[in-house]
Image (cartoon, grey):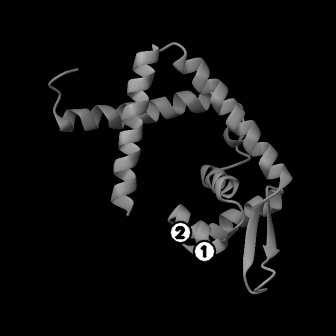
Amino acid sequence: MTGISITDFAHKIEKIMPEIMRGFARRQHSDIFKGKITLPQLLILDILNSQGASKMTDLAKKMKVTTAASTGIVQRLVVQGYVLREYDEKDRRLIIIKLSPKGSDVLKKINQQRTQLITRIFSQISEDDRAEYLRILMQVKDILDKEES
């Protein structure tokens, strides 16, 4: 695929990415693909898992949504028992959101299934190609990170 213009490249990526995402989604059997957890809810669970307990405003900033939007997402997670709301001990006006044991368990299950799926798919690709793919993805991530800051 040498000599492809950036416009043609963009069109090909635009077409193939949704197909790849749907292909991965069809092969996953986790709660997220059974409709129990939405993608925004999964992102909140991931943030809480990696950063620990957070204020609602911090979650909203990380998600790049309004506080009202993040409150709605979190409320559904509270109802499902995946996260807990607690008052800050130093300032009772602040509400802290944290991952519940049930949320931690479902996130582990989803991540294990995702890892198994990625392993199964990418084991069919050479080690060199996987390394090159990872290098390019990291480069894309770095560019996105720079554009955000």
- The C terminus lies in quadrant: bottom left
Q: Amino acid at mark 2?
A: Lys
User: Which residue occupies 37% across, 52% down?
Assistant: 144
Q: Quadrant of residue 69?
A: bottom right
Residue 89 is drawn in which quadrant? bottom right
- In this view, 86 is above or below 52: below
- x then y, percent, for residue 123: 55, 15
- Residue nearer the viewer, 37 or 50: 50
* Residue at (19% x, 38% y) in the render: 7
At label 1, the amino acid type is: Thr
Left or right side of 18 for 40: right
Q: Is residue 68 above or below residue 136?
A: below
Query: In the picture provided, is 6 more to the left or to the right than 84?
Result: left
Q: Residues within 10 Å of mark 1 (few under 14, many from 20)?
A: some
From where the camera sits, is residue 28 visible?
no
Decide: marks 2, 1 in contact (CB < 8 A)? yes
Residue at which label 2 appears: 61
Residue with the mark numbered 1: 57
Question: Quarter of the image containing the N terminus?
Answer: top left
The image shows residue 116 at horizontal and vertical percentages of 66, 25
Q: Mark number for residue 111?
A: none
